[in-house]
Amino acid sequence: MKCLLLHTFLTNHLSAPLTNHHNRLMTSSPSPTTTFSTLTPKHNLSSLTTTNHPNTVVFKSTCVKTRSLSISSHSVRAPMKVSASSAVVESSKSSEVVVDVDLGDRSYPIYIGSGLLNQPHLLQRHIHGKRVLVVTNTTVAPLYLDKVVTALTAGNPNVTVESVILPDGEKYKDMDTLMKVFDKAIESRLDRRCTFVALGGGVIGDMCGYAAASFLRGVNFIQIPTTVMAQVDSSVGGKTGINHPLGKNLIGAFYQPQCVLIDTDTLNTLPDRELASGLAEVIKYGLIRDAPFFEWQEKNMHALMSRDPDAFAYAIKRSCENKAEVVSQDEKESGLRATLNLGHTFGHAIETSYGYGHWLHGEAVAAGTVMAVDMSYRLGWIDESIVERTNNILKLAKLPTTPPEMMTVDMFKSVMAVDKKVADGLLRLILLKGPLGSCVFTGDYDRKALDETLHAFCKS
Amino acid sequence: MKCLLLHTFLTNHLSAPLTNHHNRLMTSSPSPTTTFSTLTPKHNLSSLTTTNHPNTVVFKSTCVKTRSLSISSHSVRAPMKVSASSAVVESSKSSEVVVDVDLGDRSYPIYIGSGLLNQPHLLQRHIHGKRVLVVTNTTVAPLYLDKVVTALTAGNPNVTVESVILPDGEKYKDMDTLMKVFDKAIESRLDRRCTFVALGGGVIGDMCGYAAASFLRGVNFIQIPTTVMAQVDSSVGGKTGINHPLGKNLIGAFYQPQCVLIDTDTLNTLPDRELASGLAEVIKYGLIRDAPFFEWQEKNMHALMSRDPDAFAYAIKRSCENKAEVVSQDEKESGLRATLNLGHTFGHAIETSYGYGHWLHGEAVAAGTVMAVDMSYRLGWIDESIVERTNNILKLAKLPTTPPEMMTVDMFKSVMAVDKKVADGLLRLILLKGPLGSCVFTGDYDRKALDETLHAFCKS
């Protein structure tokens, strides 16, 4: 396996304690949350630094090793420690890499590259048993189902593949649609040694993963994400689930796949709006933990919007590295992992209130990110420049920077009250704090700032 | 903590290789299953002994340590290794004991005794957060809900308790009923730090456990079983789930509780038929792994049927010890744990075909056990005396020893084809083999014997 050390990220600039000028608006001091007292001893987070405020934790960014995707027969399952190295090892063929998610006996590789669906051995080495169920939707099936079936069966006559094609869209991420997966699996007499394959975007990945977690109390599954959103975020890390009429992703499981296969060619068929939606999550990684990546995005957003393949390959790889590192440190979201939800608490309120499907997930996250950044600024935790840069980059990505006009303060509050990050009645939020690339996950903030933000973005 | 060493079980008599006279009907030798080749290296089963047949594994019985339930403040969560000791440590107050399920960081105690619901500290030490949701049914709620709410809140004003009362019966163990638990949890704005409490029989325990596994991707839960079936079997070991119209328990999760609290006084209100149903599982432990327990049951079945409290306390304790030991060795049913399903593959076919709710689970298991024992005898794997003793003890417990008359061979085959123990199309069964207390889990049996058994018990 040939690797080239291409460049080095400087990532030590994020751990400095906050100085007083960041606390401009921090006028009151609510009672400490219990969150951080349980977080710190439970997780040996090498990247966790407490600031001089006793209830605040800043997560600084580090890097993850990535290796080339060699076509040779070496085992790609060999675990690679995700470490706080300051170097990124990149492939000699930059468009084909493997990012490892290090979770002990649940570790798995993320294959990233162009044309990977034409390499059957990548999928076949992760198939358990002889039976496969591909879960996909009415949009993706005509484009890629045949290709995936071929990749699963080429030169492998023992494997038989069933498929279930679900309606497309977030509004179908519900129990009724999930039951169709179980129906198909049971009618097809699949057993515990089968493998479920999620072929599609985030909705398909989340539903197929939860179905795999629950069918016969757990079968193997593989993620083949076909949207930017799924490739940079939702397919990695094992969060699976469905929506409840009262809130997003309230029913689900932490359940890791056998592998994630990202064939970047699938983006060629992705509508512009879907493409932009995924960029909201890419921007998120920069804001919460990877300032150099954010700066790269500022320079390359035009290339991304014009679908430059090299730019996309890099954005996907760097996003997966960030995600893999966070998930490896905090699989079940005891603390650090929650930071990946920057803008999501506001965003979920938009999706739930506006009705699933009107806005794409990334569009709601984009508006939610602006709101979280606004609130961070009102708390005095970040400079105005970060507010401006966030707005600018989201606009470059043609993403919304305000919630839909119909949203009211009460709508936000009502949905946010059932957010998964509420603990003992206290809503914890991901907010930016410190220089670019630094964030906190806290319930310890001035409620006035949240109210001000909600009123600033809602007419009533 | 005072403990008395009361008696010793001799358990080394079960590992002797089978002699030829056990292979009377073993005329053909089907192709080896892959089951055992993967089972042996994956699990360090100290109690696993291969016989002189290359594809057969005999599980011999061992014992688990049990301790007294002291009311003092010592930590009852201290892990106790479940070991292959030949002694049972019993409490000085024999009706109050703790059996530990040893699963590393998912270990938990089973409290067994009379009047335990009057000891609030037992439950309260396992409550996480301030919010509790009790899941129960229309039969159990009028009897024990108030008592449980009192136990949860006595001297603990910070805890608030919600409850959801489901319709009673196996036919409601479905997705629609499960959704009522999620609805209640979300409407009550429960968060990740809440605790679900299952108060009822096996159906409630399985549904509440699966709801706890899935709500917000997993919250804490506690089992308070109120039937013999749940107390001796289903509440221990973390198998949770719901039925699908095509088969039992096909959707679910392995998810361990924080504790199991068995107040044996709850059996006072249990109908006779429910009581007998639970004894089917008690008898199972004797047949598959605990000959001395089976012999004790033969002598004490009349006492059990007349609800003798001491006899029941012992039967529950010994059953939990057997279950705890098996689960500690094979949490996710890679091999050994499957042996707890003796009679269940036939029994599930009866429940599914006959319609959930006509027969109780234990009644179907009883008939299924007779069929599994019959098949074992046809294979030449056991002596006729075991067939007779099985029939006799089930009759003493007033349990059925034949399936309902409406069952056909095709009905059995159709449901058994989607059993969770099918692997790559091959149905694996738990069958007795060798002296009393020995069993195998295998797909390596003469298909003719299965056909003969089905035809012997069905009219068409």
Image (cartoon, coloured by chain):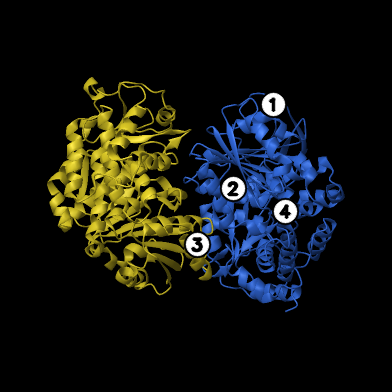
Chain colours: A blue, B yellow
Q: Amino acid at mark 3?
A: Met
How far apart are the two marked residues, 2 and 1, measured between alpha carbons?
28 Å
- Nearest-to-viewer mark from 3 and 1: 3
Residue B179 circle label = 3
Q: Which residue is mark 1?
A: A71
Whether residue A59 is situated above or below residue A34 in the rendered picture: above
Q: Which residue is mark 4?
A: A281
Q: Residues within 10 Å of mark 2 (few under 14, many from 20)?
A: many
Q: Residue at x 74, y 56 (%)?
A: A287
In this rendering, does residue B282 appear at all? yes
Q: Amino acid at mark 2?
A: Cys
Residue B457 circle label = none
Question: Which SS class for mark 4?
Answer: helix
Are circles 3 and 1 on residues that touch, CB within 8 Å? Answer: no
Q: Amino acid at mark 4?
A: Glu
Give the residue at the far front of this rendering.
Answer: B460
The chain carrying label 2 is: A
Position of B368 with respect to A119 (left or right) is left
Q: How many numbered circles are shown?
A: 4
Residue B99 location in percent, x, y? 29, 50
How far apart are the two marked residues, 4 and 1, measured between alpha carbons?
30 Å
Q: Amino acid at mark 1?
A: Ile
Question: Which SS class for mark 3?
Answer: helix
Q: Which residue is mark 2?
A: A208
User: Image quadrant of residue B372?
Assistant: top left
The chain carrying label 3 is: B
User: Image quadrant of residue B384?
Assistant: top left
